[in-house]
Each structure stands twice: as structure tokens, then as C-alpha cells.
Amino acid sequence: MLLIKTHRDTLLAPLQSVSGIVEKRHTLPILSNVLLEKKGEKLTLLATDIEIQITTSTSSASIDGDGAVTVGARKLQDILRSLPDTAEVSLNLDDKRLQVRAGKSRFTLQTLPAEDFPRMIISEGESLKFSVTQKQFRQLLAQTQFSMAAQDVRYYLNGLLLLVEGSELRAVATDGHRLAYASMALGGEVSSTRQELILPRKTVLELNRLLADNDEPLNIELAPNQIRFQFGHINLVSKLIDGKFPDYERVIPATLKNIVSLKRTELLQSMVRAAILTNEKFRGVRLVLTSGSLKIMAANAEQEEAQEEIEVAYSGDAIDVGFNVSYLLDVLNNTSVETVEWGFNDANSSALLTIPGNDRFKYVVMPMRI
């Protein structure tokens, strides 16, 4: 049975959209597959890892007959990628095998029954719905996601806090050593009560990959134990992390005695150079802030040393403090402003990095002993 006959990119683009969540090796072999489901002229592609489910669709050539099958997502994607851009591709289901044809190329892939493919159960009941642009939400993620923990035993840190209150949407991420906070205004009041949820790390990274940098709408729906995103032809449903996120407001310093303004690009380039000679394991740099000067120093086990000096307009207390340079590079690489403000109290308390005139972004980083 002929499932679809179309241009290569018509099939490859939606396949790339859904296959990002597919694990290469899975205890359930069918989860390495993508579900192809044809109804009329519409071909729907669905992938899941049980925690996240992504669905998208494309219009196929007008071919009679409906059908559904699951096939290895990565193999099909690799085949389509390797074909010429102008190739016409046909998928033909024949006796539990999928034949992929393009010009004089022929591929035969194993399949598994569509009826065995697990689908997430969509939560029923009351839900909170609101819309933002893809660009706004992608920017919110970009300003915070780098602070998420990766494989922390405190599982609630392996994700990103989304908080909806009134007409504001906030995102917070922390790994216990640093914390990133960003917020944005919503178009009118969305929720009279404070709604908090923790997005899994994999969901955040997948959204960052899929969202476009444009003003097209992103519809978000918060349901019990689930969140749903709809944009373009893509529907993404994700389970939430069940846990209590730390009280981020207590972590952000309320008052700061010493504040210095720095050119972001100059600071970033100095940090990159100093980082070359840091200890590979601890990645520590020493910052010495005195009147009119910021020195960035690094050393390693081979007794090699690096020193950078930046002229600054500063007349506060002299401060000698150490930080993990990776944490500083993360925030400087993920903001695109000209100037950043760095606030300190002393060498033993956390520092706060902000954007002048913008209270919607805050980055807290703990010092380290060097």
C-alpha cells in the first residue's frame, strides 16, 4: 500500500521536528520508532518517550487509502537526509515492511504495528490557557535554561520552574550553585492565583530546538500533571516534574553594597582567555575588584597563570572573590546586551548579575574558594 509520494523536504522537515525526543536505545523497541498515520491527504507523524509526545502533520500527494505504521525514526531520517534535495520520495507499506524509494534508490525498513504504539493520555478537566509569541518564550528559555541541573539527585532541579501569576510569566532555573531568573508580561491577566510547575530538562531543550525566532503564536495550556504547547503544525505534550522547587526569592540578594557596570563583550572575551589556564576540574577564576580596575586571574596545577585587567568606573569596597568561570561564561554567552551590572556584598556572599534598566532578568552565582 502506497502511504505517501512527495518531495523529500515535505517529509524530512516534520520528521526532524518529532524525532529529537527519540532515544537511540530504548528498553521498549517501539519507542525508537515514529508513528506514520495517513488519513486522506494528511500524514501525521508522532513520536514519544512516554514523558514527552510530539505530533506534527504534512499534506501528502493525493493518494487513495488510509494506513498507519511505525518505523525506526533515526534510520528513516538518515535515509531522507542522504537523498538529493530535489528527490521525489515514496513510502510503500508491503507485508510489514516499509519501502522507501527515490529515483533508483531503494530501502526496505522493518516496521512494528501502529496499534502497539503507546500514546500519552491527555489530561481532561480544567486547564489554564494563554498565548505568547515563539520568540518571547524562546528568549525566556535562553535566559534561564543553562542554569538547570543535569543529573542531580534533587530531581526537581533537573528542570525549569514556570510560574504564572496575574499577567506575568516567570522562568527560574538553578543547580544549587547558580540561579537564573527571567520574566515577561502577558497580554492581560491570565490567572488570579499563583500557578507553579516544573518543566523537565528534556522538554525545555526540545522546545528551544523547535521554537522559531519569530512572532508566530505559541499556545500554552497548563493541565493537571501536564503542559501542552501548540505552534505551527507542532503539538508537544509533556509530563511535569512532581516536586517542590526551592524558594528562589530568598536566593536573590535584596540589597547590594557594591555595584560595577561592565561591557559584556569585553568581560566575556577576558573570561574566555583566562579560562584557558584554569584547573580543568574546578574551573576557578579569581576576581579582584579595586578602585578603577577589575583583575581576572586564573592558575592551574602546572603553575601556569593568566591575568586580565579591565578598567572600570568603580569606587566601592575592594573585593577579592573566586567563581567557577563556566557559570560566568554561560550567562555572558546567553545575554545579548551591551552592558551588565555586577553587584557584590563581600567575598563570601553570592553575587548578582543584572541588566541595567531591566528588572526582568537576574542571575545569582555563588562564590568558590580558590
Image (cartoon, rainbow, N blue to C red):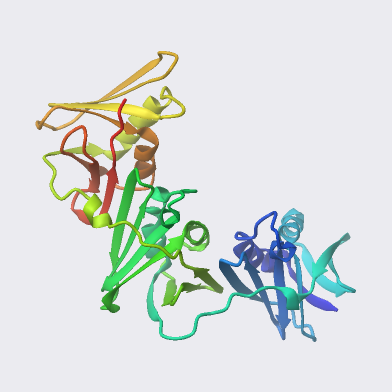
| Image height of 292 relative to 52, above or below | above
Give me the residue at 72% from left, 56% from top.
Answer: 81
Q: Can residue 213 be seen from the camera position used here? A: no
- State which quarter of the image contains the N terminus: bottom right
Give me the residue at 77% from left, 57% from top.
Answer: 79
Q: Is residue 32 left or right of residue 274?
A: right
Q: At which x and y percent is residue 51?
A: 56, 66
Q: Quadrant of residue 346?
A: top left
Q: At which x and y percent is residue 73?
A: 71, 62
Q: Is residue 107 left or right of residue 135?
A: right
Q: Is residue 240 left or right of residue 249?
A: right
Front residue of 362 and 157: 157
Q: Can residue 161 be seen from the camera position used here? A: yes
Q: At which x and y percent is residue 114?
A: 75, 76
Front residue of 319 and 3: 319
Q: Quadrant of residue 86?
A: bottom right
